[in-house]
Image: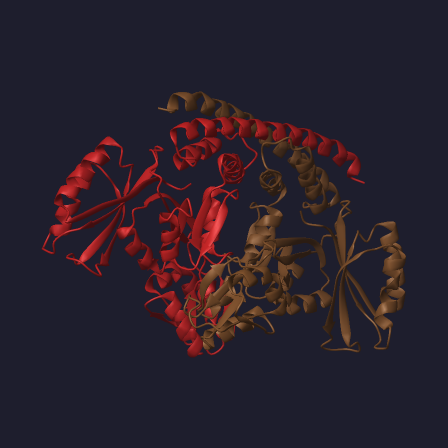
Chain colours: A brown, B red
């Protein structure tokens, strides 16, 4: 039938594939030469700033019809395969296999790496510090559960630096013990989750009370015990408490995300679109935090995240985790950081890294 | 320093990338023409047998230095991106997101599809039968937990056929409540898991008793309660019961795998290296099963899997799930199937599909 028309088209695709195969191996040979040059000077195999520049270029120069993000997925795998010819890197992550953290590894490094699942966030740090792994990938922030405290505590002490970030989409589900909304009188969730699902809830369940609780995980726990309660949470939390999904994807913004940090011994060079993560502390007196941050504003450095965390030990009451736009090697950032350091009782640059796509 | 040497090499890589970008979009344009031809005749967008042929060709013709499997990952994404220009397919899987099932989806279809997480295996079937999803991906067999019974039961009744298989590596861990082996007196696991870890256990814990139990999940449950017990199980099972990993990857064979089936309305054409899945039943009398299978041997069709499952309803005591080598459209297989059908009280072809790489 249509095979008469398809056969010549398939032959054209096969011819293009033969050219692709040839070009990809040409690229691999040049990458091997790069590897030899790097080996002479002990330069790092993985240059995230360079790989992100390649991915940004691909999107900029893409004439279509391929979609930018699909092309970037292809080029990420091409770079991963070429890099693996220099050496196949090992990347530690919070296991088990088949989790979001593993997905974060492959979305950052491509598939041509060895994943090393670890039983805890502590172990990811240990494996990477000990050199068993070249890099580690750890969760930093869930969109509604907030910061991952264990990661923040370990970042404070580690000798490793952050060399990249990965953010993966995450969906909120409406869940109950029965899987139906019969007999449900209120909906529990973290206030941020309730806010993120407001439009959807107004449309579908305008009459039900909304009850803010400390976390979405807590909401799931309550819904498992009180059958008049529905929870909004990630499916993982629901599954943990034996809940059933009534509706998946109830958040108004489909771009809800979880962030991961890539840790290692690598210090990245500026890519032109970078972020720097800092931890600071000050003596506890009025206006101290405001004064502390003044150097950023004065030097025109934008803050993209500010988070405080009670100190579990030592002299300071709070640590402040601050993300700013730019690379620590850029002039005005370097000036701002020097001034910040002078005012702070505790000061640590966790790392500068290219922003994820 | 080494940048003098690296700059010209990077320029060569950039030039190759520009050619790749051009070729990839040329390929996409031809794929769009293929889409128009297919649309005229309502031909399927996804042709797994064709995609697997492309992937096998790539490996056969690869002159190196790129590794075959890395190249296949790249080409899978290329085909996925081109296919998405015809239409971005939806694939249902057993959620939540970030699980093995989701990984199975992307390893089969590439990343340019929409994943649809479902709360149960039943829902994956329903979503696919209802046409909400183009395909569904369901677990069929765990290497040590054995068949996934719910999937087998649903396959018996569904109007869908199996159009592909995915197999993913899975690792056994030695786990205890404390994370150490202090005070441990015996090791529990499914007998198959104990067998698979025999060499490792002989080397590391020759003195500890080994206690076969019904499943690795059950072993994890016991170890959580009895602190003189260590369990061998997947990390997921351990995490569910709050166990800590003492050693990951204790199986002797690193190629332990979990199998998934791809279900849909698509009937694949022969790829040259296929498998056919059947369900059969016979009246319960001596020699019946032996006689039932005779047509396979007579026609030179190899059986790769044979599994019996008690019938939960109806006339027959057992259903036999049989995998054979070859495609149902091949002559000798067609002959064998016709003969099988004549002897069987129940007979259903679940599908013919290309063997995974």
Q: In the rendering, at what x and y percent does residue A324 appear?
A: 78, 57
Is residue B303 found left or right of B10 in the rendered image? left
Is residue B206 found left or right of A345 in the rendered image? left
Q: Quadrant of residue A6?
A: top left
Q: In the rendering, at what x and y percent does residue B279 appear?
A: 23, 49
Residue B188 seen in the current view:
no
Q: In the rendering, at what x and y percent does residue A271 appear?
A: 76, 45
Q: Is residue B272 above or below residue A324?
A: above
Please name whichever residue, A192 or A317, is drawn nearer the observer in this view of the structure.
Answer: A192
Q: Is residue A228 above or below residue A167?
A: below
Residue B34 seen in the current view:
yes
Please report the residue visible at 41 percent of the width from the left and 44 percent of the height from the top.
B134
Which quadrant does the N terminus of chain B fall into? top right
Please name whichever residue, B6 or A195, is drawn nearer the observer in this view of the structure.
Answer: A195
Please name whichever residue, B177 or A17, is drawn nearer the observer in this view of the structure.
Answer: A17
Please report the residue visible at 12 percent of the width from the left and 53 percent of the height from the top.
B283
Please report the residue visible at 39 percent of the width from the left and 67 percent of the height from the top.
B217
Which quadrant does the C terminus of chain B fall into? top left
Please report the residue visible at 73 percent of the width from the left and 52 percent of the height from the top.
A353
Please name whichever residue, B49 or A247, is drawn nearer the observer in this view of the structure.
Answer: A247
Residue ranking furthest to the front: A207
Q: In the rendering, at what x and y percent does residue A302 appear?
A: 81, 56
């Amino acid at each position: 039938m249509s095979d008469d028309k398809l056969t010549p088209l398939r032959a054209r695709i096969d011819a293009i594939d033969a050219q692709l195969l040839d070009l990809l191996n040409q690229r691999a040979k040049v990458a091997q030469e790069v590897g030899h040059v790097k080996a002479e000077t002990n330069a790092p195999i993985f240059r995230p700033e360079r790989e992100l520049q390649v991915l940004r270029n691909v999107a900029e120069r893409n004439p279509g019809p391929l979609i930018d993000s699909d092309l970037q997925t292809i080029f990420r795998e091409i770079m991963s395969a070429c890099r693996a010819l220099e050496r196949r890197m090992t990347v530690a992550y919070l296991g088990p296999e088949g989790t979001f953290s593993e997905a974060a590894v492959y979305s950052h490094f491509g598939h041509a790496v060895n994943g090393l699942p670890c039983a805890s966030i502590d172990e990811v740090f240990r494996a990477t510090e000990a050199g068993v792994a070249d890099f580690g990938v750890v969760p930093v922030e869930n969109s509604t559960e907030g910061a991952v405290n264990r990661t923040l505590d370990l970042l404070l002490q580690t000798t490793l630096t952050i060399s990249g970030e990965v953010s993966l989409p995450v969906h909120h589900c409406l869940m109950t013990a029965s899987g139906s909304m019969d007999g449900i009188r209120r909906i529990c969730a973290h206030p941020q989750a309730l806010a993120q699902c407001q439009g959807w809830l107004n449309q579908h369940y305008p009459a039900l009370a909304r009850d803010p609780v400390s976390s979405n995980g807590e909401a799931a726990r309550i819904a498992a015990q009180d059958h008049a309660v529905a929870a909004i949470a990630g499916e993982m939390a629901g599954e943990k408490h034996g809940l059933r999904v009534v509706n998946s994807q109830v958040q108004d913004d489909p771009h809800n995300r979880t962030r991961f940090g890539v840790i290692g011994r690598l210090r990245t060079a500026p890519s032109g679109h970078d972020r720097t993560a800092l931890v600071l502390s000050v003596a506890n007196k009025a206006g101290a935090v405001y004064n502390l941050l003044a150097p950023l504003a004065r030097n025109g450095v934008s803050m993209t995240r500010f988070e405080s965390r009670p100190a579990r030990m030592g002299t300071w009451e709070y640590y402040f985790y601050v993300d700013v736009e730019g690379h620590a090697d850029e002039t005005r950032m370097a000036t701002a950081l020097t001034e910040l350091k002078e005012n702070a009782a505790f000061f640590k640059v966790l790392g500068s890294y290219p922003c994820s796509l």
